[in-house]
Amino acid sequence: MTDWLSATWEASWRPFQYFNLYRLILAGVVLLAGLLPEGWVASLHLGYSLAFMLAALLYLAVVAAGFLASIHWQRRFNFQLSFQVIIDALVIGAWMFASGGVSSGVGTLMLVSLATASLVGRGRLVLFYAALATIATLGGQVFGVLVRNLEPASIVQAGLLSAGFFATAILARLLGQRLMVNEELARQRGISLENQSRISQRVIERMQDGVLVVDSHGLVQRHNPMAVEMLGSAPAPGASLGGFCAPLAAALAGWQGAAARATTDFTPATRGELRARFEQTDSSAGEVLIFIEDIGRIQERAQQLKLAALGRLTASIAHEIRNPLSAIGHAGELLREERRGAMQDRLLKILSDNVARLNRIVADILELGRRDRMQAEFIPFRAFCEQFIDSFASFQGVAPGVIVLEASAECAIHFDRTHLHQVLWNLLDNALRHCRSLPGSVCVRTAAGRADGLLEVHVTDDGGGVPEGERAQIFEPFFTTHHLGTGLGLFIARELCEANGASLDLDPEARCGHFILVGRSDTCQLPEATGARAAS
């Protein structure tokens, strides 16, 4: 037996218990044979005397004690096995001697005990068991030839039987070792499979995508927690996919009927749009794997990639673009002082306007890079907006009354002042660009107080609104529908809102320009000093 197997193999007590059970039955049959008619057991050549009955009873007691020990005292396996084999060798040897030697056929019982002991035994002990059986058989036969005048030729028969003992022990040992090696290999593979199953289960549980396993009958077999979160509820064990999520079941049926692609978008009743990807498994049950992705998260991931690229671009813009722009603008100012004519003034005006536009793009991108540097506080919204609208209207040259404010004096918003100023500036600049510039064309108002502690700020204009086909792109960087726009105003406004724990969205049902800013509001946190400073 190899060293690793000796160190890892545990004694197989269950086969040893079966071995003891067989010996217990054998001892009981021998004892019971004494109660049968003599003609029935004449071929055994046994004389059922009182001494024989006492010996059989003692053997039954020893075997019963060994059987109980193998169940309740599972220690010192080799000692218990060796002791029981020695008892068998002595008892079967004596029985064979009493039955007339090798010719009685009792020696075959020794083969059964020896083979079983060799299967469950360890190491070189099996050779000891074979040697012990040989001594009992040959010794008993030689003694029978000398004392009971048995045939001397029977010694050769006993020798052949003894050789069979060694052959049986060795072959059974090799077979037992092979079985134990296979058992150890199966155990190790079972452990590896269990570990792999646990790792796979943990990976599936931690996946950002939902996973469903559906059998060929459309019944949900397994799912992960993300699938429950995406679909709004957990399917009952063995539930039908059609009863659990009808849109997903319809998408699966379309894919199985080759009427749809392997990737399909669907909308459950409890959540926004999701994307399902179907894969057929090679299992015998014909199960189908369904991977569910949140389209919103996919778009957010794409947006993050854009932000990462934009961040890398920001560092180069500050040095590679702004400095040349300053030089171009300065050269334009010098040329304007010469006043060569109307044509030159017109060209210099075009040059100046485009330099200013590029400077705005650079400033917006650099502002976006400072989105994480903020000091949020509770700001009295009405007082802040009054000052902001005055300065904004003065800077942009907006006529009085075009921008109106409808906000309660008690409401406050948790925001960084610089960020809030930039967000409102971008929203109002966008509203002025598309409105009709009439009194009240642009309105900044707050909604009624919400029970969840949030403040809604609505910025509306009386323009034509955002076309349906462009609403999905309105917050993307560098997307603009105006020739003077940079395409960064709304994008930066939303990014600054998210940095302050707020949200900025376009009202999907409005026919005009209507943006909704939702931020944290808590009037109890509004200090008096802050309100006084804003009002001054």
Image (cartoon, helix red, strand yellow):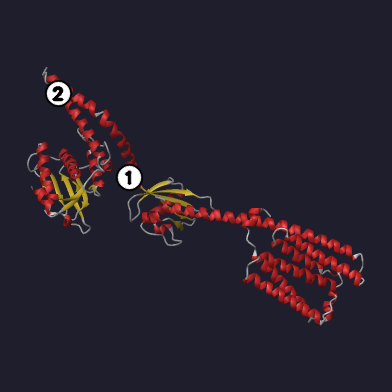
Q: Please report the residue visible at 78 percent of the width from the left and 70 percent of the height from the top.
A: 90
Q: Looking at this view, is 119 or 202 the one in front?
A: 119
The residue sitting at 86% across, 64% down in the picture is 158
- Seen in the picture, residue 63 relative to 504 is either above or below; the reply is below
* Crowd tier of the residue under label 1, counting other residues whose Cα lies within 10 Å: few below 14, some 14–19, many 20 or above: few
Which disc number belongs to residue 479? none
Locate the N terminus by quadrant: bottom right
Q: Disc 1 marks which residue?
A: 300
Query: x, y percentage for residue 488?
Result: 24, 37
Measured in 3D between alpha carbons, the distance from the residue under mark 2 to the one under mark 1, in whole angstroms, is: 44 Å
- Image x and y of residue 118, in percent: 72, 61
Q: What amino acid does circle 1 point to?
A: Glu
Please state which amino acid type lies under the numbered disc 2: Glu
Q: Which residue does the numbered mark 2 point to in the structure image?
A: 333
* Residue 406 visible in the current orientation: no
> Circle 2: is it few (<14), some (14-19), or many (20+) Cα within 10 Å?
few
Point 42% across, 51% down: residue:
207
Q: Nearer the viewer, residue 104 or 461?
A: 104
**Residue 234 screen position, x and y as percent:** 40, 59
For mark 1, give the secondary structure: helix
Residue 178 visible to an observer of this rendering:
yes
Decide: is 313 above or below 100: above
Which residue is at the front of the view, 386 or 218?
386
